[in-house]
Image: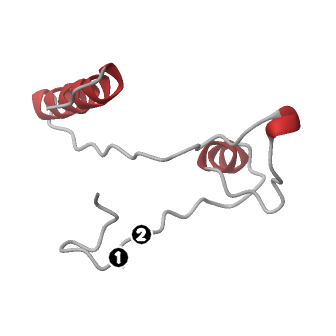
């Protein structure tokens, strides 16, 4: 079990998503990313080409790009995902 509030809340939200999906006959996935939005201002980084998930999703929603791609099923792990 997590020993800090950050880990505990991540686990609690995953349980909540799972419970809601099961209760309503839905499927769900929980994606975890480090820095999905990117930094801003003087601590920021280049966004050309954009590589952060949230700006990419907004661009796709606004019709500025046709789609976003999710990569990561070829890792040398038992199930091919980027497990820790």
Considering only vertical position in the picture, is 38 above or below 68?
Answer: above
Residue at left offset 62%, top offset 46%: 57
Residue at far top of view: 5
Question: Which one is nearer the viewer's eye here, 71 or 42?
Answer: 42
Secondary structure, mark 1, is loop
Question: Which one is nearer the viewer's eye here, 13 or 67?
Answer: 13
Residue at left offset 55%, top offset 64%: 69
Residue at left offset 75%, top offset 57%: 50
Q: How far apart are marks 2 and 1 (CA)?
A: 7 Å
Residue at left offset 86%, top offset 33%: 41
Residue 72: give its label: 2
Q: Do the residues labelled 2 and 1 touch (CB within 8 Å)?
A: yes
Where does the image place residue 15, in percent across and percent down from the top left?
A: 18, 29
Secondary structure, mark 2, is loop
Residue 42, picture quadrant: top right
Where does the image place residue 8, in percent across and percent down from the top left?
A: 25, 24
Considering only vertical position in the picture, is 26 above or below 71?
Answer: above
Question: Which one is nearer the viewer's eye here, 5 or 74?
Answer: 5
Q: How is the image coloured?
A: secondary structure
Pointer 1: what residue? 75
Considering only vertical position in the picture, is 26 above or below 66?
Answer: above
Residue 26, picture quadrant: top left
Where does the image place residue 78, in percent across and percent down from the top left?
A: 18, 74
Residue 20: give its label: none
Residue at far front of view: 3
Mark 1, residues whose alpha carbon is within 10 Å: few (<14), some, or many (≥20)?
Answer: few
Compared across the picture, whether 23 is left or right of 11 comes to: left
Compared across the picture, whether 13 is left or right of 51 comes to: left
Give the position of the C terminus as an image quadrant. Answer: bottom left
Where does the image place residue 1, in percent across and percent down from the top left?
A: 13, 32
Question: Which one is nearer the viewer's eye here, 79 or 70?
Answer: 79
Q: Which of marks 2 and 1 is in front?
A: 1
């Amino acid at each position: 079990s997590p020993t800090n509030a950050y880990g505990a809340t991540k686990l609690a939200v995953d349980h909540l998503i799972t419970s809601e999906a099961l209760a309503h006959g839905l499927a769900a996935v929980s994606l975890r990313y480090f820095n999905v939005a990117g930094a801003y201002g003087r601590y920021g980084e280049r966004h050309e080409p954009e590589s952060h998930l949230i700006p990419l999703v907004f661009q796709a929603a606004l019709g500025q790009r046709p789609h976003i791609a999710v990569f990561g099923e070829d890792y040398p792990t038992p199930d091919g995902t980027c497990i820790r």
